Image: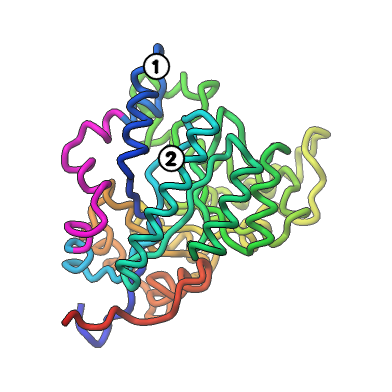
């Protein structure tokens, strides 16, 4: 990329882990007696030597890979499923440690990292307090929640304190995938389709749609939701969702003030994590507007060079490119506006 076309690059779905979570999840693995798709995913990630090392690293190879590919900043978040498979008190304690550790990394590398908080939805009131601490005291830029918790979704009343806190703080919730809940997962298992190949997006797209059709966004209009992986399929389906919502009105669904697609365009943004592919990128831009699409890699699960090559090969106008690579992230997450870190001495 020539200096004339060089723009700031912020990647917005980039994972890390801390040793305390590794240790806690090892206990979950040991205690498991039946197949669980999230435990299977965790074991595969933890057992992959390079991947496991890259998740732990915040100061060496990660920065070198960013430098080699022109990535100015990563928006970091704790790897899925985060603390959401732990017992409530343990989950809350590790979430707090992870947020402190993330804030320390940002202080050490202020031009290279920003961060999304971790909370334990198992304890909603505590999660709301931790979100407020993370945003107000640690200066993190939002919160990432790995879809369902104990097989339940965020539109359910018990999670209202978390959503109300996010809306009051005007800080976004990044709704990140995990494997489908047990009631869904069986149909995926024959060919191990319950993970990133298909199950992740089906699960998280469902979660996003539940938030819309529940009527929650009429009550919390300031709530902002981020969906990765090109919006988990929802941008492709918006027209059909509107049509079916209108034509098949049922008493189980609340009345909405607007069409489902309007809530999606007003309350959601999407990132390109794992979906830096020209046709998918163009669909999201055409369906939502370039101001609703943010660049992401999904490091270390996706290759940085490959993600950027896909974006660079897309037929983007200069304004679209700048919006997707950095301006939207600066606006949505409140990341400070600057082009790059000062030269190293």
Query: Label 1, label 2: how many angstroms apart (C-alpha)?
Result: 17 Å
Q: Is residue 238 magenta?
A: no
**Residue on which disc 2 sits:** 82
User: Quick one: SS at disc 1?
Assistant: loop
Residue 232 seen anywhere in this rendered image of the structure: no
- Determine which of the numbered discs, if any, sits on residue 83 in the image: none
Q: Residue at x 33, y 60 (%)?
A: 105
Q: Is residue 44 magenta?
A: yes
**Residue on which disc 1 sits:** 32
User: Quick one: SS at disc 2?
Assistant: loop
Look at the image and give the residue range highlighted in magenta: 43-63
Image position of 141 with respect to 229: above or below:
below
Residue 241 seen anywhere in this rendered image of the structure: yes
Instruction: Examine the image and state in which quarter residue 79 appears.
Output: top left
Quadrant of the image for the N terminus?
bottom left
Front-most of residues 139 and 32: 139
């Amino acid at each position: 990329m020539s200096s004339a076309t060089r723009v700031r690059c912020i990647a917005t779905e980039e994972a890390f882990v801390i040793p305390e979570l590794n240790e806690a999840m090892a206990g979950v693995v040991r205690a498991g007696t039946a197949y669980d798709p999230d435990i299977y995913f965790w074991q595969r990630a933890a057992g992959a030597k390079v991947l496991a090392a890259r998740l732990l690293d915040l100061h060496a190879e990660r920065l070198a890979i960013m430098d080699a590919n022109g990535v100015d900043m990563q928006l970091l978040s704790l790897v899925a499923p985060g603390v959401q498979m732990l017992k409530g008190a343990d989950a809350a304690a590790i979430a707090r440690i992870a947020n402190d550790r993330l804030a320390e990394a940002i202080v050490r590398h202020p031009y290279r990292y920003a961060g999304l908080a971790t909370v334990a939805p198992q304890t909603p009131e505590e999660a709301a307090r931790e979100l407020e601490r993370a945003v107000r005291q640690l200066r993190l830029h939002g919160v990432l929640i790995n879809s369902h918790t104990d097989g339940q979704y965020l539109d359910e009343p018990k999670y209202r304190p978390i959503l109300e806190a996010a809306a009051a703080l005007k800080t976004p919730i990044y709704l990140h995938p995990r494997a489908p809940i047990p009631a869904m997962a069986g149909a995926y298992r024959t060919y191990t389709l319950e993970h990133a190949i298909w199950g992740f997006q089906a699960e998280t797209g469902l979660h996003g749609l539940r938030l819309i059709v529940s009527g929650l966004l009429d009550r919390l209009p300031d709530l902002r939701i981020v969906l990765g992986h090109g919006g988990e399929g929802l941008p492709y389906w918006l027209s059909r969702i509107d049509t079916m919502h209108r034509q098949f009105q049922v008493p189980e669904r609340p009345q909405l003030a607007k069409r489902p697609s309007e809530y999606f365009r007003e309350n959601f943004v999407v990132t390109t994590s794992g979906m830096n592919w020209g046709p998918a990128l163009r669909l999201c831009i055409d369906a939502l507007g370039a101001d609703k699409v943010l660049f992401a890699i999904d490091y270390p699960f996706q290759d940085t060079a490959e993600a950027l090559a896909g974006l660079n090969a897309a037929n983007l106008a200069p304004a679209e490119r700048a919006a997707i690579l950095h301006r939207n992230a600066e606006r949505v997450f409140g990341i400070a506006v600057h082009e790059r870190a000062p030269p190293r001495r």
